[in-house]
Structure formats: structure tokens, C-alpha cells
Image (cartoon, rainbow, N blue to C red):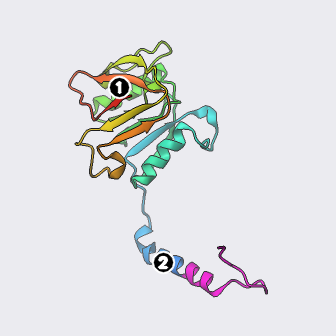
Amino acid sequence: FRRVLFRSDGTIDKAVYQLIGSVYQYVETCEPWCQDAKAVTEIAILRDTNTGYHISPGGDEEGTMRSLQQLGQQFDFLPALPEIDVSKYKVLVIPAGIKLTDGLIKIVRAFLKRGGSLIIEAPAALDADGKLLLPELGIETHGASPFTTTYLRFDKSVGEPAGPSTAVTDHVLYEKTQRITATKGASEIGRAHV
């Protein structure tokens, strides 16, 4: 089934006009609320400055972006540079492809010290030897998992409002994972098993 947008004489189909009209009517209704409005973003995602302007399909940044979009969250992309300002954000997300330099580590430490929350993928949290770059994370690393497939089961506390995607069941992780455990008052929200 294919929707016909144009008639044989080149004019737009009446149903298409109605669809366009309904969209613009909604936009017009919202317009007074948008005058001088500013986006309120509490989440920042660090981006690799070597990847250019566009997000590479299937990359770490795309997965992070899609997850936040599905959760209905506003976010900004920030370049992973040591002079970035993260002071206006409550959550900082660092995807796997980001390499934490000394300058970025300093920024992340200051961010955590002032009460910010951090979501960081394991590869970004480790140096080339697999050692933890940020002891403040409250985790202990145990190296890469020897298995190609791992199963993750979230704790009951995660459940709602996160939705059915975090149900207390096994979720398959097809990529290599890192083994970590919580320490120093940190809490686990799930467990991996094979």
C-alpha cells in the first residue's frame, strides 16, 4: 500500500492538504507559548570532536541520543574538549567512544563534586590498561568479560517509570562487556550473567 500524495494533474491530494492543515493548526495553537522560549536541557552528551558535525549511524552517540529521545528527554551535545562548560547541566553522559583526557577528568570531577549525576560507558571510564580513571564512580573493575553474549537483569527498583524495557527479565547484550562491582556506597541496579 502506498499513499498517493499527488493526483495525475499534479495537484496535492485533499487528504494531504487536511493533514498539513492539522499540523500547522497545532503549531499555530502552540505559537504563543513559544515566543521567547528557551530550551531547558538538563542533560549533556559529550561528543568526539574527530567525528565531524554529523552523528555516525550505529555509533555510541547515536545509541545515547536514541535512548534519551525515547525517554522524552531534552539534551545537548557538547564537544569533548577540556574547556567545555557543564555547569548548567544536572546529568552528564559520556559514551564509550570518548577518551577522557586530564582536562576532561578535571571537569567531570568538579561536576560530580557539585552534585551532578554521571552516566558513563565502561570503555570511557577506563584507561588503555583497563584501570579506572575516576575512583569517584564507586566501582571496582574486574576486566573484560570473556563471553561474547551477556545477559543483564535489572533490579526491581529500576522498573517503573523506566517502563517495560527495564522489566525484571533477562536482556541480551551482544557486545563485549566489562565486569564491574559497586563499592564505596554505590548501589547496583542490575546484574549481568551468562
Residue 68 vertical placement versus 174 (above, below): below
Q: Which mark is residue 109?
A: 1
The question of residue 154 being in magenta is answered with no
The N terminus is located in which quarter?
bottom right
Task: State which region is magenta.
Answer: 1-21
The C terminus is located in which quarter?
top left
The picture places residue 61, in percent across and down from the top left corner, at: 52, 40
Question: Distance from label 2 to label 1 (Cα)?
Answer: 44 Å
How many residues crowd mark 2 within 10 Å: few (<14), some (14–19), many (20+)? few
- Looking at the rendered structure, the kind of residue marked 2 is Glu
- Looking at the rendered structure, the kind of residue marked 1 is Arg
The question of residue 14 being in magenta is answered with yes
User: Is 9 or 23 nearer to us in this picture?
Assistant: 9
**Is 138 situated left or right of 35 in this image?**
left
Q: Secondary structure at mark 1?
A: helix
Q: What residue is drawn where x is 63% and y is 42%?
A: 53
User: Is 88 or 108 nearer to us in this picture?
Assistant: 108
Which residue position is annotated with label 2? 28
The picture places residue 10, in percent across and down from the top left corner, at: 77, 83
Q: Earlier in the sequence, mark 2 or mark 1?
A: 2
The picture places residue 78, in percent across and down from the top left corner, at: 50, 39
**Residue 152 in sight from this viewpoint:** yes
